Image (cartoon, rainbow, N blue to C red):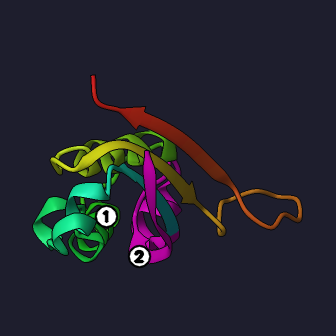
Amino acid sequence: MDRVAVRGLRARGRHGVFPREREQGQTFVVDIVLGVDTRPAASGDDLSRTAHYGIVSEEVVAIVQGEPVDLIETLAQRIADQCLKHDAVQEVEVTVHKPDAPITVPFDDVTITIVRSRG
């Protein structure tokens, strides 16, 4: 399986369990790695036979900006489900970063990474 990756998608969302997170929102960063067999697209130089990463990226940002959820686990699952709606995508790895998570100790980042596939 070939991999098409988009890293560092940024969007503001209102996800989290605390009222402040829902009211003020915060920036989330998303990395996606799409498992795609790129041979059909490459053999015919045909965009319609692969995953259009521009469209997928726009969909990911819309999910982050959309309906709030409590957990980044839920957000990651929603993103994975959307990616798998594209026929060419057989597998997806989604990492959601929450760099402004409400933690009382110094930290660089909070992430969740999930891998989902068809079937």
Q: CA distance from mark 2 to mark 1?
A: 9 Å
Q: Is residue 40 left or right of residue 25?
A: left
Q: Looking at the picture, which amino acid does disc 1 mark?
A: Val
How packed mark 2 is, by other alpha carbons closer than 10 Å (few <14, some 14-19, many 20 or more), is some
Foreground tag (2 vs 1)? 1
Q: Which residue is mark 2?
A: 11
Q: Looking at the picture, which amino acid does disc 2 mark?
A: Ala
- Residue drawn at x 28%, y 48% is 89
The answer to whether 16 is drawn above or below residue 31 in the figure is above
The answer to whether 91 is drawn above or below residue 50 in the figure is above
Where, by quadrant of the figure, is residue 46 drawn? bottom left
Q: Which residue is mark 1?
A: 60
Which one is nearer the viewer's eye here, 25 or 84?
A: 84
Most extreme residue toward the left is: 48
Helix, strand or loop under label 2: strand
Quarter of the image with the C terminus is top left
Discs 2, 1 touching: Cβ within 8 Å: yes
Quarter of the image with the N terminus is top left
